[in-house]
Structure formats: C-alpha cells, structure tokens
Image (tube, rainbow, N blue to C red):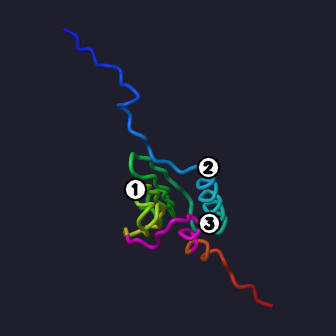
Amino acid sequence: MSVIAPFPSPADRHPIVAFDRKELMRILDLYGRMVAAGHWRDYAMRFEADVAVFAAHRRHSERPEVRIEKRPALRLKQGAFSLVGEQGQLLKRGHDLGGVLAPLERRLMRLVGP
C-alpha cells in the first residue's frame, strides 16, 4: 500500500525571519570593510522561524568571531538586533542596527598622525 502525504497549505507554513534589504546592505557594507582591513574572511547566514543570524568568521574553520542577530519577538523589549561575541556573550542590543554595529565600526577607525 502506498501512503499519500497531503500537500502543505499556506496556513501550515511558518514565516521565516530575515534581514530586509537595507539591513543586509548595512551588514554587508561593514563585512566588506572588515575584509579589506583583514579582520574577517568568511561569513554565514541562517534564517529560522524566530531568528535571522549573520555570522562573521576570521577563518571558515573557526567559530564565528561575531554574530548579528535579529529577533523580532524582542523588538518591543530590549530591541530586535543584538551583537553576540565569539564565546556567546551579548556585546550590544538595541532597536537600531547602526547602534548595534557601532562597536565593530570603531575597530576600523584609525588615528591619523601628522
């Protein structure tokens, strides 16, 4: 006997959290500058039902140096965006992606001497 599986309906599908175009452009712009500075070499993205994650790696074989997470469920509390360090510690959380990425952008600043 054969078993017939029902075709999934749109009501059965769960929405997936993702970065919108402006957020992804901002993250990839930072990633490109960090690659040019020699800090990062690889990245990975993960999209699930409750979280979207952008992970930046020094090398592809290591754990990510930082993770940028978007959790819309927290947007009314601490903020939807968070910056997580290599050991899993929460470095920054906020409602605005620019404020969350500020610690990483400070790494790129260099003092120019006379």
Q: Which residue is mark 3?
A: 34
- Of badges 1 and 2, the one in the foreground is 1
- Residue 99 magenta: yes
Residue at the spot 63% in from the left edge and 59% down from the top edge: 26
Residue 28 position, x and y percent, is 61, 56
Q: Which residue is mark 2?
A: 21
| Residue found at the far bottom of this picture | 114
Tell me where the magenta segment starts and ends, as one range: 89-102
Residue at the spot 47% in from the left edge and 57% down from the top edge: 70
Labels 3 and 1: the sequence-earlier one: 3
Labels 2 and 3: the sequence-earlier one: 2
Q: Secondary structure at mark 2?
A: helix
Tell me the number on the disc at residue 73. Answer: 1
In depth, the one of 26 and 9 nearer the eye is 9
The image quadrant that residue 35 belongs to is bottom right
Cβ atoms at labels 2 and 3 below 8 Å apart? no
Q: From the image, which quarter does the N terminus lie in?
A: top left
What amino acid type is highlighted by mark number 2? Arg
Residue 88 position, x and y percent, is 37, 68
Q: CA distance from mark 1 to mark 2?
A: 20 Å
Count residues near mark 3 (Cα–Cα under 10 Å), then give few for <14, some for 14-19, many for 20+. some
Q: CA distance from mark 2 to mark 3?
A: 20 Å
